[in-house]
Image: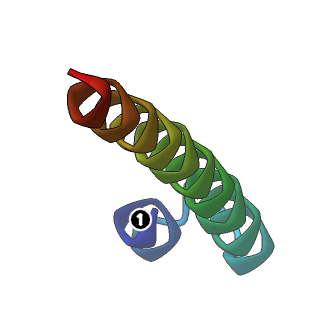
């Protein structure tokens, strides 16, 4: 995103919006992975 702003292909507002969207997606995926790990740990402990 920084390169796009530097090359004048995007505004700083676009950059901030894109970074926020990327962060939201990252947070969601981390949360999903944490839930899967917790479920797998529970499954392993039951054995």
| Along the viewing direction, whichever of 44 and 15 lies nearer the viewer | 44
Relative side of 34 to 25, left or right: left
Q: Hey, which quadrant is residue 4 in on the image? A: bottom left
The quadrant the C terminus occupies is top left
Q: Secondary structure at mark 1?
A: loop
Q: Whole-percent x and y of residue 23?
A: 58, 62
Count of marks overlaid on the render: 1
Vertical relation: 22 (above or below) 12: above
| Residue 38: % across, % down | 42, 44
| Residue found at x 51% / y 70% | 5
Camera-side residue of 43 and 6: 43
44 in relation to 35, above or below = above
Quadrant of residue 24 in the image? Answer: bottom right
Q: Residue furthest front?
A: 47
Question: Position of 18 compared to 31: left or right?
Answer: right
Local crowd at mark 1 within 10 Å, few (<14), some, or many (≥20)?
A: few
What colour scheme does the image use?
rainbow
Q: Nearer the viewer, residue 44 or 5?
A: 44
Which picture quadrant has residue 45?
A: top left
Residue drawn at (69%, 78%), measured in percent from left and top? 12
Which residue lies under the disc numbered 1? 7
Say which residue appears at 69% left-offset and 74% top-offset: 16
At 54% from the left edge and 66% from the top edge, which residue is drawn? 8
- Residue 7 location, x and y as percent? 41, 65
In this picture, residue 29 sits left or right of residue 38: right
Q: Nearer the viewer, residue 38 or 16?
A: 38
Question: Would you place residue 23 above or below residue 34 in this image?
Answer: below
């Amino acid at each position: 995103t920084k390169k796009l702003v530097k090359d004048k292909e995007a505004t700083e507002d676009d950059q901030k919006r894109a970074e926020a969207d990327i962060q939201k997606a990252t947070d969601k995926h981390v949360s999903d992975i944490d839930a899967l790990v917790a479920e797998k740990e529970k499954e392993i402990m039951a054995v």
